[in-house]
Image: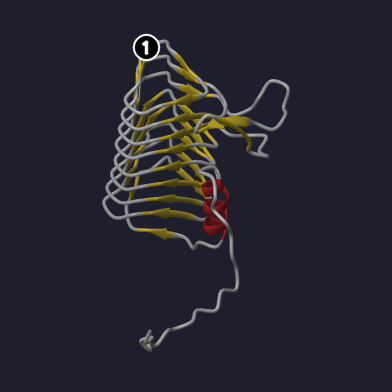
Amino acid sequence: MLLKEEEMDGIFLKEWRDVVYPWHLLDANEEILKKSHKKIEGDISENTILNGTVIVGKNSKILPGSFIEGPVSIGSDCKIGPNCYIRPHTSIGNGCHVGNACEVKNSIIMDHSNVPHQNYVGDSIIGQDCNLGAGTKIANLRLDKKDIVVTLNGNRQDTKRRKLGVIMGDNVQTGINSVIDVGTIIGNKVFIGPGAMAKGEIKPNANIL
């Protein structure tokens, strides 16, 4: 058997981080943001506070009363505020909305997702094209403060994290005043009804009423 000779280029890596489980993205996101540099390309309204390293993409608007505590990255075409609190190590994609009386902490919100009305999102990953109904709250800390164990593909897995909210797929919708328990994993196209509680592992296309 003849082997074909091909040229290969090598890349020297100074750092390496394994991303095996979804929650490992939060660790990688934190490391990247710590090395980021401030860049403001959007419109910052008066009566807003930006502390530390904050990145705001093109055509994004930061509305009055918003408090952003870096390192934080906000993509293009976003609407942030009014009167919201975005805490460190949060990355927000393009075309997102974080609205009135919302708090987002140490989370990844992917493109075209909305956290618009009196929501709390902590230590979570929100997929694309998701919408949280008014008053949706995501728990991220057990009452006993122990490490969070999740169910992934039917198996119990210790995340070795004291704080973990939700791992949410794409096109998920929640109704008003819904609650998502610590360490919940939600598949794509799930509907969580008004006042419902979601917990554990929820398969794609499910309705939680």
Query: Which quadrant holds residue 13?
Result: bottom right
Specify how the rendered protein is coloured: secondary structure
Give the crowd class for mark 1: few <14, some 14-19, many >=20 residues within 10 Å.
some
Q: Nearer the viewer, residue 30 or 83?
A: 30
Left or right of residue 149: residue 191: left
Q: Secondary structure at mark 1?
A: loop
Q: Nearer the viewer, residue 136 or 59?
A: 136
Q: Nearer the viewer, residue 128 or 186?
A: 186
Query: Which quadrant holds residue 192?
Result: top left
Q: Amino acid at mark 1?
A: Pro
Which residue is depicted at the point 28% across and 44% down? 95
Q: Quadrant of the C terminus?
A: top left
Left or right of residue 163: residue 180: left
In percent of width and height, residue 181 lies at 54, 22
Residue assigned mark 1: 194
Left or right of residue 69: residue 141: right
Q: Quadrant of the N terminus?
A: bottom left
Which residue is depicted at the point 35% across and 28% down? 204
In percent of width and height, residue 164 lies at 58, 34
